[in-house]
Image (tube, rainbow, N blue to C red):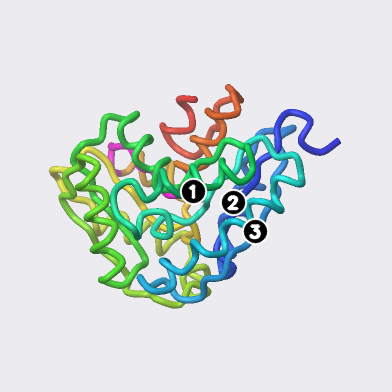
Amino acid sequence: MYGWRARVGLIVPSSNTTMEEEFRSWLPDGVSLHVARVRLRRVNVEELSRMEKYVDLAADTLADAGVDVIAYGCTTGSLVGGVGYDERIARRIERITGVRAIATATAVVEALRHLGVNNVAVATPYIEEVNRKEEEFLRGNGFNVVSMVGLGIEDNIEIGRQSPEVAYRLGRSSFHRDADGLFISCTNFRTFEILEALELDLGKPVISSNSSTLWAILRELGVGEPVLGLGELLESI
């Protein structure tokens, strides 16, 4: 039986081509992945806000697979409504399904706190209006954003086409000497291949949207197996 250890339900934007592939490659043995999609083509405030209306059906269908946890796998889609929006999305999924839910934005906040990162540098593929929403959310949750650099990409398919090397170079260029750590945002931005190298090169913790979400999922499931090769966060489960 697939998922003999645990079953993960994942809701991703319809144009996301990265998150489920990174998860399938790194989930521990015995943990299966089951995915539903909600419509999003362009990463802007209007479309991110509209995603919420598709959540109920996606969550309900995932519950049919007997999943043990449901992750809402979109960073800015779970923070676009401001501080607390991530938690409201998760509670909504839980009311519909009776299954514990985690939003990516919540996972990022918890991961930064776990690592003791108060002054954070942020790298994103986003356009400026989306970066502003993310900065407001992080500041509203008590973090000092010391730098934020974006690639200015709105087409989500184009974000998914970026190589891990792009994420590495962006992370290096966005890092600030006053930062306690680096956060690379977006569940459609490939980061898993470069997280460990970037963390070693910077000498500071490095997390991404996907590493934070994976970490939060495994903790919620009680899967205590460290995931090696993705940096300090996932080694500390």
Is 81 contained in the magenta span?
A: no
The numbered dot on residue 57 is: 3
Instruction: Identify the element where label 2 is drawn.
Output: helix
- Mark 2 belongs to which amino acid? Glu
Which labelled disc corresponds to residue 22? Answer: 2
Picture layout, residue 10 above or below residue 50:
above
Residue 217 locus on image (x, y percent): 55, 36
* Neighbour tally class for label 1: few under 14, some 14-19, many 20 plus, Cα within 10 Å: many
Q: Earlier in the sequence, mark 2 or mark 1?
A: 2
| Percent position of residue 114, x then y | 34, 29
Give yes or no for contact between labels 3 and 1 (Cβ–Cβ under 8 Å).
no
Closer to the eye: label 2 or 3 = 3
Q: Residues within 10 Å of mark 3 (few under 14, many from 20)?
A: some
Residue interval drawn in magenta: 202-211
Q: Residue at x 27, y 71 (%)?
A: 129
| Residue 90 percent across, percent down from the top left | 49, 44
Disc marking residue 210: 1
66 or 199: nearer the viewer: 66
Q: Nearer the viewer, residue 110 or 185?
A: 110
Tell me the kind of residue under disc 3: Leu
Callouts 2 and 1 close, C-beta under 8 Å = yes
Q: Amino acid at mark 1?
A: Asn
Q: From what the image shows, is residue 105 above or below residue 125? A: above
Q: Residue furthest front?
A: 95
Tell me the element at label 1: helix
